Amino acid sequence: MARQTVQEMVDGLIEDLGGRKISVLAPVVRGRKGEYRKELQDYLRQGYLRARVDGRWIELEEPPALARYRRHDIEIVVDRLAVEPSAASRLAEALEAAIRLGNGLAVAWAGEGEERLLSQGASCPRCGTSVETPAPRLFSFNSPYGACKGCDGLGTQLKVDPRLVVPDESLSVEAGAITAWGDATGTWYGGTLRALARHYGFSMKTPWKRLPARIRKLLLYGSESETIRFEYRTRKGSSFIHHGTFEGVINNLERRYRETASEPVREKIGSLMNPTPCPACGGARLRPESLAVKVDGLDISRWCALAVSDARERAGRLRFAGSQALIAAPILKELGGRLGFLEDVGLGYLTLDRAAATLAGGEAQRIRLATQIGSQLTGVLYILDEPSIGLHHRDNRKLLDTLLRLRDLGNTVVVVEHDRDTIEAADWVVDLGPGAGRHGGEVVAEGPPASLSAQPASLTGRYLCGAAAIPVPARRRAGNGQALEVLGASAHNLKHIDVRFPLGAFTCVTGVSGSGKSTLVNDILHAALERKLGGGGAFPAAHRGLRGAEQLDRLAYVDQSPIGRTPRSNPATYTGVFTFIRDLFARLPESRVRGYAPGRFSFNVKGGRCEACAGDGMVKIEMHFLPDVYVHCEVCRGRRYNRETLEVQYKGRSIADVLEMTVEEALDFLGAVPPIRRKLETLRDVGLGYIQLGQSATTLSGGEAQRVKLATELSKQSTGRTLYLLDEPTTGLHFEDVRALLGVLQALVDRGNTVIVIEHQLDVIKSADWIVDLGPEGGDRGGSVVAAGPPEAVARAKGSYTGEALRQVLRT
């Protein structure tokens, strides 16, 4: 960048805006809070009459009252003139005055959306573009001075997705291929489409995919250059003719979305929209002036697109000289340290611009942990809840070294964990049990890890010393001879890979963190199968094709998302067992006498519930400046139902008593009812015998929610052609719970079904029939199939970190 003289500014304006009228503005206030009443009066006394305040033109004789605690932009109008060579001296005087008032900045305004920022401080020597002196806010997409004007710093704009407008390309226009416009045989839109067919010479009966690309583009995006004769018929039989251009289905939808005030219409059109990269910034989120500043050939957006490990390596190679070296030294030291902390906790594969909403719980927790390491505090108690979630065996060592470093700084680290390596690395272990739920709550052992094996009541100790173990299967299934094949997977970091999943077998997809497992299984395989088997769902991520889907008739996808986002949702309602319980209570003699139907025993329906709390059992007390407080309802005492409903009892227990039972208690109490018994047994079989039937969904961990979903799927009748997809099902599970879960999954496969899991837990990996190991590293250095085959074959594969860990396990 170079300094630009006033004469150079004048010459540039004459060349760009010659013959046009402009206003020369002096930006005296930029993004600062205050009322500025006195300052505006001073400018009026100096002879200036107009200004632009927060984008609005005002007269300084009657300035508006500005909010004291809001940020404002104030630009004084210095002169208004035509840009002509004959007015060059006047233009120069106006620019000099504006630069003097604006501390080196001036603005040439030529109309709405068209203005030039002029600066004596910095300008491009080639194109003459001026920018203000760089400040941190210029490189922040959260600041109006750095954010792209096209997308306000979001990087994306909501645009109608053509795939959602025409979801089924095998349909013709007449048969309703353009679902957003509904019936093509009548209505206003139908008349429009028929006129288009006549004008452009295509048949409305031709399947969409067989229409010429030119016609499909015209229908979606219109043509403003051709006048078309549209003929419409009214319901009374009369007709009228209109000549005009066609704006296109997508342009029509986007215009109506912007202009309509009807919320239902906006919701309907919004369902057809997806975020697309902003055309102004290409997804970089910043304005051109911000992206023009580069370090080592990269602008800040491209720096943030680097993975943590790549950014650390590249920043370490930066070299500066002279005064630049003095300025950069502390910045580079801090940058290298922070990136190093992220890499130390196993997050080297994450890109710096990764959206927080896309992070797994374990990743977010480790980012917070890296922040704490950088603080170098001592005397702090750190409490971590399963930090190893989502970590490969190789990366776990880095996390443990980080925790030990925190301890060695003089801090206390308390970790809730089931991982064997973490337990064995601890200085002190507190083992709770002996069982779960009502069978637990006691300290069965405490002391160094090696001492747990001497405690007979410690199930953890038995697994640590080898007295209890999950055995390696005696045989590996070869499958049923058929396979699912994902072809040309290229989304995110996947390297155009073909992956084979044998059907009728138990497959485990593994690999280091960030190697592409979730992209392959969740974003491609799950989404593609959901659309093929169910006809709906999200569009799969980039891949060439999918083979073998016709061999399946059902897909069961079990992830760790909550089973409900309100306290009303619970395991009983989610699994459907509550329906049978309500039917049981409705069939009791007391209910028949009173005329109670099953709805009487629902806490979501008026009639049987407590109306004081609307069936919540809790009442929210708003604390204004403090978090809201929830207390038990004073009327029902937290039991959710009114007195009349609670008077109906089965074996001396009311419907509220049943909801307070654990799964095991309910199985003993209601096990004589076959449909109830089957659903409760599946909850128990997946290790959830300790949870209460009416336990709020918001209190369940991710692993518990996933197992509730799994139990719901298991309680359904299996056809033997079902594919079960699970994402890290061992999260939150003890060794003994893992053993029970594996028994359930193996039983599913024995009945002819297919199970595919994403997993790092070695007991699960060694129990699989087939392994797909991705890597070799995370991020850009991942995305390849490192090894595929039975566990014994993967253990022999060179370059497989999973194989290295398996060699130790299979040897025992």
Image (cartoon, rainbow, N blue to C red):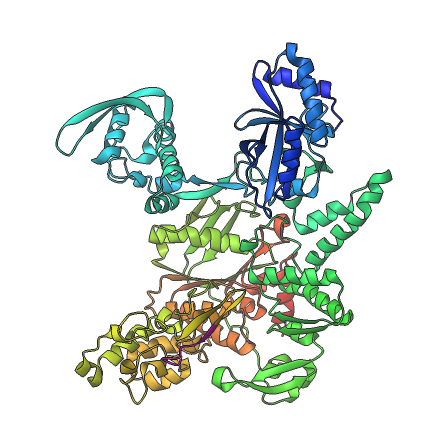
| Up-down relation of residue 552 to residue 663 (above or below) | above
Please give the name of the residue rendered at 69% of the width and 76% of the height, measured from the top-left corner. Answer: 426
In which quadrant of the rendered image does the C terminus lie? bottom right
| Up-down relation of residue 789 to residue 645 (above or below) | above
Q: Is residue 651 visible?
A: yes
Residue 359 location in percent, x, y?
Answer: 56, 56
> Is 654 displayed left or right of 305 in the figure?
left
> Is 319 displayed left or right of 254 in the figure?
right
Count of residue discs: 0
Residue 445 location in percent, x, y?
Answer: 63, 86
Residue 333 location in percent, x, y?
Answer: 79, 51
Please give the name of the residue rendered at 38% of the width and 23% of the height, measured from the top-left corner. Answer: 224
Q: Which span is picked out in magenta?
A: 630-637
| Up-down relation of residue 438 to residue 633 (above or below) | below
Residue lying at the far top of the rendered structure: 86
Task: Please identify the quarter of the rendering in which residue 81 is found.
Answer: top right
Please give the name of the residue rendered at 33% of the width and 71% of the height, measured from the top-left corner. Answer: 576
Q: Is 369 or 309 nearer to us in this picture?
A: 369
Q: Is residue 44 magenta?
A: no
In which quadrant of the rendered image does the N terminus lie? top right
Task: Please identify the quarter of the rendering in which residue 557 is found.
Answer: bottom left
Q: Is 251 or 504 nearer to us in this picture?
A: 251
Task: Please identify the quarter of the rendering in which residue 344 is found.
Answer: bottom right
Q: Is residue 633 magenta?
A: yes
